[in-house]
Amino acid sequence: MMIYGATDIGMVRRENQDCYDIRTDFPSGHMACVVCDGMGGPAGGRQASGIAVRAYMDCLSRRLEPGMDTPELRKLSREAVSEANHAVWSAAREMGYPSMGTTLVAAIVCPSGALISNVGDSRAYYLTDSQIFRVTRDHSLVQDMIERGEISEEEARTHPKRNLITRALGPDDAVDCDNYVCQLRPNDALLLCTDGLVNTLTDTEMLAIVRESSPARCPARLIDAARTRGAPDNVTVVIMRDSEGGASS
């Protein structure tokens, strides 16, 4: 399994408030990645995402054990999300930033596939040779509107309230995460990203870039494509695939 990531400030923001981490060397034999998108602007967004990433990975480092099955990994990821939330919540009060918070999407990779967790509107996608599937559900106002039939998926991409999320790490002393299990088949890929990518590229465009790129080049090519569209927000991408697949470019 190969995992690569990249982050970029974009074309408009003055600060990159996204953060990510990739770990491929856990003694338990697992691999993991996590992507966070800070919120609160100058009032702690960058700090929130960094704190959450460190706390999530630190929890995995302490508690991952060889041979953990899916229910055990699901429980562990919930604990890691809870620790990350508490760390951001505590920091927000210490720093005097009540609006400080962050999204989170993470994946723990094991021989049977990947356990994915999310809070907020950073996403995970599963990609085959010809199709792209969104794994996670956004915790956002526009997602709720889509599910009520008030707006379409396409309208949500440009809706003026598309950045309003209904769940995040930090605002409250407890938070729930959603969990999903993906079976990673040979040459298929898992993509984790912030909304800075999905608000600039369509799913079809993301699929084409992933299939035409080597895993090592894929994050940079996705970010370049977002920047070509103006990249009004920070953009972070993590891609994982169990074989080289894709083109060499």
Image (cartoon, rainbow, N blue to C red):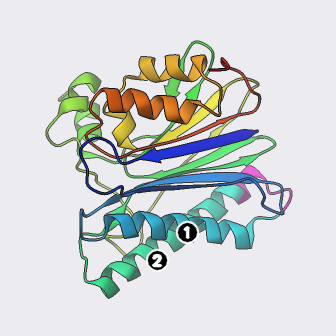
Q: Is residue 41 left or right of residue 82?
A: left
Residue 111 can be seen, yes or no: yes
Residue bearing mark 1: 54
Image x and y of residue 66, in percent = 85, 60
Q: Position of residue 202 (x, y in %)?
A: 37, 22
In the rendered image, the residue lying farthest to the left is: 160
**Is residue 193 shown left or right of residue 229?**
right
Residue furthest to the bottom in view is 94
Location of residue 224 (image quadrant) = top left
Residue that carries the numbered disc 2 in the rendered image: 87
**Above or below, 118 relative to 51:** above
Quadrant location of the N terminus in the rendered image? top right
Image position of 48 with respect to 193: above or below: below
Disc number at residue 29? none
Is 95 magenta? The answer is no
Q: Name the image quarter holding the C terminus.
A: top right
Q: Are marks 2 and 1 in contact (CB under 8 Å)?
A: yes
